[in-house]
Amino acid sequence: MATIFSKIIKGEIPCYKIAEDENFFAFLDINPLAKGHTLVVPKQETDYLFHLEDDLLAGLTVFAKKVALAIEKTISCQRIGVAVLGLEVPHAHIHLVPLQTEADISFSKPKLKLTKEEMEAIAEKIRQQL
């Protein structure tokens, strides 16, 4: 059965897309910890990040780096935090979260409530930096 991320990649569910190539896809998290919080996923549906073939895992990391550098140019932050949890959606993914402090990447804190217009503007600004 297709995951929600596979449906997003196929365009069956709308998203705020940041970047895409033949193997990977990046889009804003709709329940962000911070403005610019982005998910990076392989197009190949794999439940667990470390079950990816080595070349695909390496490619995902390089793709995530490009996206992270674009986020960093767009969102004022100290760093881009990286988290791999993988329990909430059975599709390998990496969270890229703009950080001011380590507490900014706590998934137990309340999520931001951003408007569609705010999300679209953030996505556009990040895409311009790629």
Image (spheres, rainbow, N blue to C red):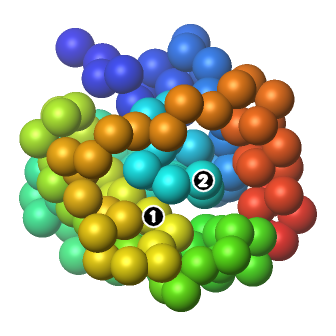
Q: Which residue is mark 2?
A: 35
In this orientation, does residue 2 appear? yes
Residue 76 lies, in percent from the top left, at 68, 75
Does 99 sit left or right of 44 as displayed? right
User: Which of the 4 quarters of the picture holds residue 4?
Assistant: top left
Residue sitting at 75 percent across and 79 percent down?
Answer: 73
Left or right of 125 in this view: 51: left
Q: Which mark is residue 43?
A: none
Image quadrant holding the N terminus, namely top left
Q: Position of residue 13 (x, y in %)?
A: 55, 15
Foreground pick, 103 / 123: 103
Judge whether residue 65 can be spotted in this image: no
- Residue 126 image position (x, y, % from top left): 76, 61
Compute the Cα span from label 1 to label 2: 8 Å
In which quadrant is the C terminus drawn? Answer: bottom right
Element type where label 2 sits in the image: loop
Left or right, 71 with reference to 55: right
Q: Amino acid at mark 1?
A: Val
* Label 2 CA crowd tier, 10 Å (few <14, some 14–19, many 20+): many
- Give neighbour class at mark 1: few <14, some 14-19, many 20+ (Cα, 10 Å): many
* Residue at 30% across, 23% down: 3
Amino acid type, callout 2: Lys
Helix, strand or loop status at disc 1? strand
Q: Residue 105: give x, y in percent of width and height.
A: 31, 64
Q: Which residue is mark 1?
A: 97
The first of marks 1 and 2 along the sequence is: 2
Q: Residue at x 12, y 64 (%)?
A: 50
- Mark 1–mark 2 contact, CB under 8 Å? no
124 to 90, vertically: above or below: below
